[in-house]
Every structure is written in C-alpha cells, then in structure tokens.
Amino acid sequence: MNVRPARSGVRKSPATIWDVARAAGVSVGTVSKALNGRGQLREETRTLVRSSAERLGFRPNDLAQSLLRKRSFTVGLISTDAYGRFSIPVLEGIESALEPARISVFLCSAADDPAREQQHIDSLMAKRVDGIIVTGRRTDKRPALALGKAAVPVLYAFAQVADRNALCLLPDDFGGAVLAGEHLIGLGRQRIAHVTGPEDFEAVRRRRDGFRRALRTHRHTWRPERILVGQWSEAWGREAAARLLALPERVDAIFCGSDQIARGVVDGLRDQGVRVPDDIAVVGFDNWEIIAAATRPSLTTIDMNLRELGREAGLRLLAMIDGESGSGVVRLPCRLVVRQSCGARRVA
C-alpha cells in the first residue's frame, strides 16, 4: 500500500480576534478596545492582549480599522520623475515623517501622462487615502490635480501649481546660487563664469539671478559673455569649457547649474591642460552624489536637501490631515557641500 507523505508546508489559517481573546483570557470586545486604544482598560490588560496578538501573529483588518477611525493610514505620492533622481530622496524624507504615525505611502509614476495621472488619482481615491503629495522632475508650474469634489489634502513637493490656495514646497534655488557665488568670491576668485541649462526652466533663471546677486553684492562685474546657456548634459559642459577658454580674459572659476554640467566642464578643462582647482575652480548644483563623488577632483556643489524637503512635506501633510490649513510657496534652504574642485581645502 502506498503511503502519501505528510505535507510539512501546509499553510495555517491566520489568527483571528477570537484566537487572541482565548489566548489572553478576555472577551472579544476587550481585545478590540485594547488594540484600538479605546475604552477604560487597565494597562496590564492592554499589555496582555497586545503580547498575545503579537505571539499569534494577529493582524487587525485594515479596512475595519479605517472604517472605525475614519482614516486609511495611507497617502499617495504622484510623481512625474520617471528616473527617480529627485522623487526617491523626497520619498525617503516623506516616509521618515510618516513612519511614526504608521502611515504608508503609495508611489505612483505618472510620467507626464495626464491620462495615467488621472487613473492614479481615481485609484487613490478608491483606496480612501488620507492625503496626496505631488512631486516631479522639475519645479516649474504644472496643472493642479483634478480631484473633483473630493476633500482630500493635497501638497506639492518639488513641484508647484498656479493655485494660490495650494501649498508648494520647493528648494531655494536663488539662495543656493548665492551660496555658491559667495563661496567662490570668498576664495579670492575674481573672474567667475556661469554655465547652466535650458532657460525655460525656472530653476535655471533663479540660479542665474542668485549668482548675479552674489556678484553685485561683492562689487564684481556681471559679464554676459561669461554666462552660457545650454543643455543638462556633460557634453554641453565640455563645449562650454572650450568656449570659456577661448575668451580674451581667462576665467578663474565656473559656477555650474547642475552637477552633470559641472562634470563635463571639469573634463573639458582637463582635456585642455587646465588644472582644477589650481587654475580654475568649479562648483556644481544638485549634490547628485553618484556624479559629484566620481568627478575628478570631487565636486563642490549645492545640495537641495531633498530628503529634508520630503520630510517637511510629510509633516505638513500630517498637519493638513488633522485639519490645519496650508497654502503658498515655501522655499527651503539649500546647503553648500565643499569637496576638492573649488580649492577651499588647498587654500585652508
């Protein structure tokens, strides 16, 4: 007679609230109150119930919990940043703010597709999320979310809309450029150029204006021929370096509108036998660590503090969920990260 071997991997049914009640020797109602933080119970009873639930691996029904508390303890994050360059640090900051409140984040990639974005909105509304944060790959104004009559708090982080009633959190590109310009001036650099990206980006215009403010504050002459506008690419950085070296009066420092451009500038200067930072100092913008650390010499740059921006977005969304209002454009400070390309350590 053939004997069928017993199956060792049989899946057990999940523990129920009745299992917890039996294990703790209390009623089902007491278990519910203990796990939901309600009712007048002794602390030792709550501790007994919670330890029994943990030992049995009991997980309260999320839907029942949300109906009871009128909260789903979830928020949506809609992003147009398909590569995650900006959205991932923002997400990390958001989660650090929401984790203590036991709120989970649904990340939805819209990829500049309005129809796909609306599909994500409809899905998040069906899940009854407590709020939505919108982020992107650039900070220029975009259309506001189309929520209809849904009263769900919405916040924009590394994104903005024209609606004055919306709350938009952005890095202070102007202030970051002032930091970069003043740092180079403080190192004794006199003829500073600026190589940046497409002028239709608001960030490009604000960084250029911040750089101009730093020059004028310290009575340095603004020279239009030293301001080069191109693409967000290393190739443009190399081309811009060649153009600057062809000027009658050689520059002694270059402030770049992005780390990608800065790496191209450094490579272009090295190809022409120019030493960085001895002959020309270079400062970037973004603190894209994979670029900044791999540049030779390592790149001094402006950090947009995207994780902190995300954390602030999470905290402000929590306040909005609790009934507080929020509106306007808030620009959070950037910081200078000093490495080798500016010559600061050599001067020191």
Image (cartoon, helix red, strand yellow):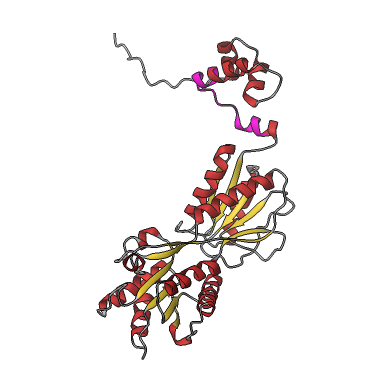
- Give coordinates of residue 134: x percent, y percent: 59, 55
- Give coordinates of residue 258: x percent, y percent: 43, 69
Q: Is residue 55 magenta?
A: yes
Quarter of the rendering occupied by the N terminus: top left
Q: Is residue 306 left or right of residue 1?
A: right
Task: Give the answer, above or below, for where 14 lies relative to 79.
Answer: above
Task: Give the answer, above or below, for where 243 lies relative to 315.
Answer: below
Q: Is residue 107 magenta?
A: no
- Give coordinates of residue 110: x percent, y percent: 54, 57
Quarter of the rendering occupied by the C terminus: bottom left
Q: How many marks?
A: 0
Q: Main secondary structure of the magenta part?
A: helix
Question: Outermost residue, right direction?
Answer: 149
Which residues lie in the magenta part? 52-66
* Residue 165 occupies quadrant: bottom right
Q: Nearer the viewer, residue 284 or 249?
A: 249
